[in-house]
Amino acid sequence: MEKKKKTTNCETCTNYVYDEDYDCYVCMINLDEDEMYRFLQGTNYSCPYYRLDDEYGVVRHQN
């Protein structure tokens, strides 16, 4: 059985931060050439560095 990868959304990732120098949001991860190519090809990219920006996740884990 083939495992289906989830499509990721940069806007909900902890690595997607506002850069004041560029005046826009940027990814803090330096994707290699192959990863960048897959990312730019469309919306089905499954980023291996994606981490959900869930502030309450830490609190739930502590309880």
Image: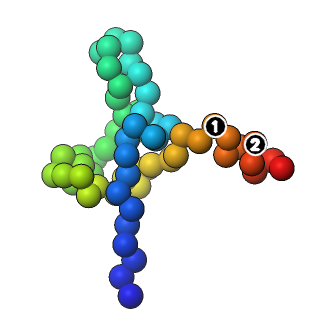
Above or below for 8 versus 13 = below
Instruction: Look at label 2 and name its amino acid.
Output: Val
Label 1: which secondary element? helix
Q: Is residue 47 left or right of residue 34?
A: right
The residue at which mark 1 appears reads as 55
**x, y percent for residue 11:** 40, 37
Q: Residue at x 81, y 47 (%)?
A: 62
Q: Residue at x 67, y 41 (%)?
A: 56
Residue at the right extreme? Answer: 63
Label 2: which secondary element? helix
Q: Residue at x 37, y 46 (%)?
A: 9
Q: Is residue 2 left or right of residue 13?
A: left
User: Is residue 33 visible to us here?
Assistant: no
Q: Is label 1 in contact with label 2 (beta carbons under 8 Å)?
A: yes
Query: Residue 53 appears in which quarter of the rendering?
Result: top right
**x, y percent for residue 15:** 46, 37
The residue at which mark 2 appears reads as 59
Specify few, some or many for label 1: CA neighbours under 10 Å numbering under 14, 14-19, or 20 or more.
few
Q: Is residue 34 left or right of residue 1?
A: left
21 or 1: which is nearer to us?
1
Query: Residue 55 appears in which quarter of the rendering?
Result: top right
The Cα–Cα distance between marks 1 and 2, rounded to whole angstroms, is 8 Å
**x, y percent for residue 58:** 71, 43
Instruction: Look at label 1 and name its amino acid.
Output: Glu
User: Is residue 7 visible to us here?
Assistant: yes
Q: Residue at x 30, y 15 (%)?
A: 22
